[in-house]
């Protein structure tokens, strides 16, 4: 379940390909 969620988040982040967004989501979920 958790891995599926992370996979969807990763795909979502890649759409924007922004390091700021990537770090933001990592801070939220980790």
Image (tube, grey):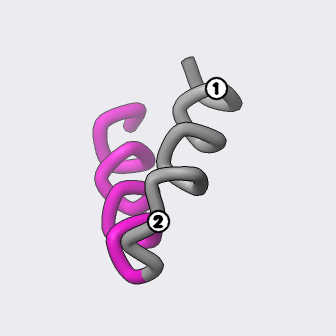
> Majority secondary structure of the magenta segment?
helix
Q: Is residue 14 left or right of residue 16?
A: left
27 is within the stretch colored magenta:
no
Q: Earlier in the sequence, mark 2 or mark 1?
A: 2
User: Could you tell me which residue is drawn at 30 percent across and 36 percent down?
Assistant: 3
Q: Which mark is residue 8?
A: none
Residue in the foreground of this view, choosing between 23 and 28: 23
Q: Position of residue 19 (x, y in %)?
A: 45, 53
Q: Secondary structure at mark 2?
A: loop
Residue in the foreground of this view, choosing between 21 and 12: 21
Q: Is residue 20 left or right of residue 3?
A: right
Q: Position of residue 20 (x, y in %)?
A: 58, 51
Q: Which residue is mark 1?
A: 27
Q: Which residue is mark 2?
A: 18
12 is within the stretch colored magenta:
yes
Comparing labels 2 and 1, the label whose residue is closer to the camera: 2
Q: Quadrant of the N terminus?
A: top left
The span from disc 2 to disc 1 (Cα, nearest Å) is 14 Å
Q: Which residues are magenta?
A: 1-15
Q: Quadrant of the C terminus?
A: top right
Q: Position of residue 14 (x, y in %)?
A: 33, 70
């Amino acid at each position: 379940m958790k891995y599926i969620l992370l996979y969807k988040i990763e795909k979502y982040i890649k759409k924007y390909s922004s390091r700021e967004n990537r770090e933001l989501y990592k801070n939220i979920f980790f």
